[in-house]
């Protein structure tokens, strides 16, 4: 899950792969405010064209994970981005204008916005309006589900592991069983996800997930897709917490593949990928003069969450420690979604996000948007079993009263 989602890049990938989303790429992105002049409500000051809804939603999820409630104006801004049919685009510069055929609907933005609005409803000024928005968004996602059970980045685009995983996470977070969310052909999101899983016998990507098959139909291991699909295969989302008891990840091929086994195989792949350097890496961009791989901070954070949720927190610990030492500059440059990713990684590992290395991630995130409401220390507001303890985390971080641990992606969704 790259911090700054590149909608255009995802659509370009769809064109190269010959998917149905290619047609949507012809619509020019809506004009956006200049950096530093965003309208009141959104988080961050950089151009929101490709990630406005995504970063707002991740910020909400991280704030709820630390007990804060987003300001009403921030919640209103996100809800106002929704189209009449329930979908969201990456960002609409003028939300007063109705969405039309040229509005590029985004399954990733819709899924994470649905999850975020559900998470903040309990303390919201108008919870019934958020309930309606969540239902409309979920209904729209069902309406654009592909026959194979999955989703592409854009409505009608060929299914990919990342988009399908983001939707699965949102469904789980809003109390919907992903396995019951069937397509017209009777396929579930898990059926689609399994088609992207590489077998343990694969020489280069044992247990990994691919983003999509390449032009020749071959599956190529993709760490970003693997982190997302591992969480989704476990029926969890980016707010997942540490699983217990812990279990060392191993890769096992079954005669009849199952989604839970595929998820554990994904955890095995991530463990080996992280063990090489303590973090994931980004290959050089095509045509770049610098051919050296670079650290992939965002997807390393996602991998930490996925491993913790799979019961492999011990294997994820070195990567978390690497993040504590090396993520500050990246987060400052990338903004709200980056801080959110790190907070969720810390939370998944029972680590205090207010003392993340030398950083107070909570304070830094809150400073990127409207001041949130004071922390709520009452019962959890999350609807996911995996995420119990949202508000209790504030107690851990501030008062250090509770001594027990409390148990995204998505995403620049590029191949």
Image (cartoon, rainbow, N blue to C red):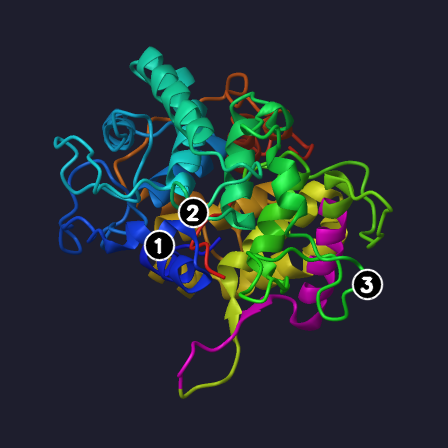
Who's the residue at 52% across and 23% down the image?
382
In the picture, measured across the screen, residue 285 lies left or right of residue 43, that is: right
The circle on residue 157 is 2
Q: Nearer the viewer, mark 1 or mark 3?
A: 1
Mark 3, residue position: 201
Image position of 72 with respect to 229: above or below: above
Q: Nearer the viewer, residue 296 or 257?
A: 257
Indicate which disc, 1 or 3, sits on the residue closer to the N terminus. Answer: 1
Give the residue at the far bottom of this rendering.
Answer: 289
Q: Nearer the viewer, residue 211 or 348?
A: 211
Image position of 221 with respect to 107: above or below: below
Q: Which image quarter: residue 68?
A: top left
Q: Identify the secondary structure beneath mark 1.
A: helix
The circle on residue 389 is none
In the picture, measured across the screen, residue 211 lies left or right of residue 290, that is: right
Is 283 included in the stretch rendered in magenta? yes
Indicate which disc, 2 or 3, sits on the residue closer to the N terminus. Answer: 2
Residue 175, how many percent across, how many down? 56, 20
For the record, the magenta segment spans: 263-288
Q: CA distance from mark 1 to mark 3?
A: 33 Å
In the picture, measured across the screen, residue 3 lies left or right of residue 172, that is: left
Who's the residue at 62% across and 32% down the image?
187
Q: CA distance from mark 1 to mark 2?
A: 7 Å
């Amino acid at each position: 899950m790259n911090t700054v989602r590149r909608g255009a890049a995802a659509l370009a990938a769809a064109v190269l792969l010959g998917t149905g989303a290619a047609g949507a790429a012809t619509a020019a992105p809506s004009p956006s405010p200049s950096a530093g002049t965003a309208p009141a409500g959104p988080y961050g000051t950089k151009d929101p064209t490709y990630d406005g809804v995504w970063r707002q939603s991740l910020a909400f999820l991280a704030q709820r994970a630390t007990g804060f409630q987003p300001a009403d104006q921030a919640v209103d801004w996100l809800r106002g981005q929704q189209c009449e049919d329930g979908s969201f685009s990456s960002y609409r510069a003028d939300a007063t204008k109705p969405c039309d055929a040229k509005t590029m609907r985004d399954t990733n933005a819709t899924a994470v916005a649905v999850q975020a609005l559900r998470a903040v409803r309990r303390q919201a000024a108008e919870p019934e309006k958020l309930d309606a928005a969540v239902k409309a968004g979920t209904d729209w996602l069902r309406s654009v589900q592909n026959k194979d059970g999955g989703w592409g980045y854009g409505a009608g685009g060929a299914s990919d592991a990342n988009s399908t995983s983001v939707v699965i996470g949102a469904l789980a977070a809003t109390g919907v069983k992903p396995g019951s969310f069937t397509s017209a052909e009777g396929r579930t999101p898990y059926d689609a996800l399994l088609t992207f899983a590489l077998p343990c016998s694969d020489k280069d990507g044992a247990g990994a997930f691919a983003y999509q098959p390449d032009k020749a139909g071959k599956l190529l291991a993709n760490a970003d897709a693997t982190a997302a699909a591992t969480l989704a295969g476990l029926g969890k989302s980016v707010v997942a917490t540490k699983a217990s008891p812990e279990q060392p990840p191993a890769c096992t091929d079954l005669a009849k593949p199952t989604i839970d086994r595929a998820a554990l195989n994904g955890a095995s792949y991530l463990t080996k990928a992280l063990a090489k350097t303590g973090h994931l890496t980004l290959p050089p961009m095509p045509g770049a003069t610098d051919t050296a791989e670079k650290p992939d901070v965002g997807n390393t954070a996602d991998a930490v969450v996925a491993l913790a949720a799979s019961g492999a927190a011990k294997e994820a610990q070195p990567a978390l420690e690497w993040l504590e030492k090396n993520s500050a500059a990246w987060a400052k440059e990338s903004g709200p979604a980056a801080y959110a990713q790190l907070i969720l990684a810390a939370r998944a590992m029972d680590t205090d996000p207010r003392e993340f290395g030398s950083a107070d991630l909570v304070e830094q995130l809150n400073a990127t948007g409207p001041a949130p409401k004071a922390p709520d220390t009452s019962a959890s507001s999350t609807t996911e079993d995996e995420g119990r303890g949202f508000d209790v985390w504030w107690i851990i971080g501030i008062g250090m009263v509770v001594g027990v641990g409390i148990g995204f992606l998505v995403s620049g969704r590029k191949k």
